[in-house]
Amino acid sequence: MLNDGSKLIAICSADNCAEYNNKFLVALNEEAKKFPFKIIFFTCFSSLYQLEKHDLGESYIFQLLNHDMLDGIIMLAETIKNDKIRQNIARQALDRNIPVVSIEHPLEGCYNIVYEYNASIKRLIQHLIDDHHYTRINFLAGIKGNSFSEERLQIYREVLTEHNIPIEEERIGYGEFWAGPTKVVLDQFLKSSLPFPEAIVCANDTMAITTIHYLMDAGYRIPEDVAVTGFDGIEEALEHVPPITTIQYNYGQTAHQAYQILMDVFEGKTPPATSCIQSQIVYGNTCGCQTNIRKSYNNLTRHLYERLDAQHQFNEVQIAMAADLTDNNSFQDIFNKLMRYENTFGATRYWLCIVDDFLNETEELSDILSDNMLMRSSYSNHMDMMLANIDGQWQGMADFNTSDLLPHLDQLLEENDNLMFMPLHVLEHTIGYVAIVYDPAKVNMAFLYQLLMNISNALETTKIRQRQQNIIMSLETKYIHDPMTGLHNRRGFYQKSQPLYEQCIEAQQPILVASVDLNGLKYINDTYGHADGDIAISTVGHALAKTISEHSTCARFGGDEFVAACQIKDPEEADQFRQTIQDYLDNFNANSGKPYEVSASIGIVHAVPNPEVTLDDFIKYADEKMYEEKAKHHLRRKD
């Protein structure tokens, strides 16, 4: 319950671009205003039928259901084509004693609302037989084995049997609820040896519309030569010329009944486990009736062109937006550019929220290559609200607990009757979600789907690009660095020191080049082991690292050999370079507890280079001085 005493109801649905499902959302939004309810839609655009990678990404939106704040749930269960997801939504709520109303797909433990359309189908077929005296009636079923399709087919068989009309299997075909298979079945009907049908009953409006146009293209008149009926009452059927006789759901009554069931539960009443809503026949002209319905091609054409024009304009904006979002250097660039397209969300209030750590631009290579980092199969415990627009005013960014859904949710629900949450994802990888205040007069679900996928793809592309750049930088670092000491390797040394050397030539400034060689590595390896030999090598490397500045670089060339190059003007600084190394080694020897001392022979050349002398020449001269010092070191050891 909210602070103002309103009950908070979640509505779960899928396949929002389908007209049938969209009509339910409109009705649920409208009827909620008649009850002391606030509603939150958790919805996605896929039907979740295949539950492949894209469907998985869509389905994660239902993970946002916070049962601690919800008073009830209404599920458009038939829109969610995956039974596991339906059952999971219901089970999690029922386990917490939250009432669930399931519409059109009965679920155990829920209050179920079903359509009593069998009687309407029966009346429709009887109407064809009794009022129009048709006896040759074909039936276009949906998907074979589908419960709705088989129920409608069974009623067809029963009505024909009641009227002593023989059931001829050749008059039955499965159009699978869409155009392609319907045309195949119609072709079979036309080639059948049976007398041509007087009427064709279709299990949905899409097949009815396909049937009408297929037969008209074949030269048949509707309904003079053959009558056609549909089912669903979709807009295209109701606005068709001629109007199609069909059966229509009562969306408003269904939505009202769902809310009334929850209200009864909240008031301590016991609603029936199953409620039936009567569907209704909408008589058009395609069955042979002469109705008063008159559809104008001019009006239909105008509406069609308006939709096409809106789609064209939206596509143009999306193309421009896709180009804008692709041309960016960071996530912040994306969000800044999205602000130019504030009107494309179809809402005056909306929020764009991203999973925690998605926006991290400095991932380590090990993290990037980790399966856990690559797989974002759920929402993080915290979210980052990156964009929020309230009545044209942009709000500041915020982070919040995912269980809260949005910052200051209670206040938002006091100000608004509803909120709608939709997923941002690419395939099964979760990116975040978008929330809007749902206004059916402003929102075009198909447009919104395209917009959210466009945003998701842009964010994922930027993520991939940054990961690629991080991988390149990491590999480049490994490519030019010595793994034992962390200093540059030979390749890295020349990459950094050659430009430094050339600058000194051009500016006629002195450069220091040092050759450093660890003394007694073979002795340490042979006497104390290679692990201690590695310690000695690393110690010299660390000593050299103490000398590194903005205008210098040090490298391990291999084994016990090191090289350094520094832009040093003052000869005293050259002496300090040697002393820094010696001080570090003295400190190590005093505190390491090792039975050996780490020392190094150092050869230094400090001079102004000229174009005739190469960096390698400087290194060679430094080597010569280093070997002179190493010879002195050996002599001191003999003494």
Image (tube, helix red, strand yellow):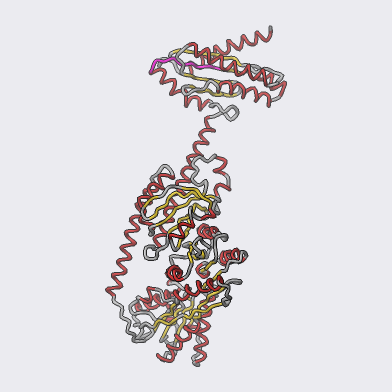
Looking at the picture, how far across and down is residue 129, in whole percent? 44, 90
Residue 201 drawn at (x, y percent) = 44, 82
Q: Which residues are magenta?
A: 507-515
Residue found 61% across the figure and 66% down from its top:
97
Residue 229, quarter of the rendered image: bottom left
Does 316 sit left or right of 628 as displayed? left
Residue at image point 33% right, 78% down? 241
**Which residue occupies the extreme bottom position in the image?**
164
Residue 163 falls inside the magenta stretch: no
Q: Nearer the viewer, residue 563 or 167?
A: 563
Q: Position of residue 629 (x, y in %)?
A: 59, 11
**Which corner quadrant holds the C terminus?**
top right
Can I make out residue 312 in this image? yes
Q: Position of residue 257 (x, y in %)?
A: 50, 75
Total label count? Answer: 0
Q: Is residue 402 above or below residue 45?
A: above
Tell which residue pokes out farthest to the front in this image.
Answer: 4
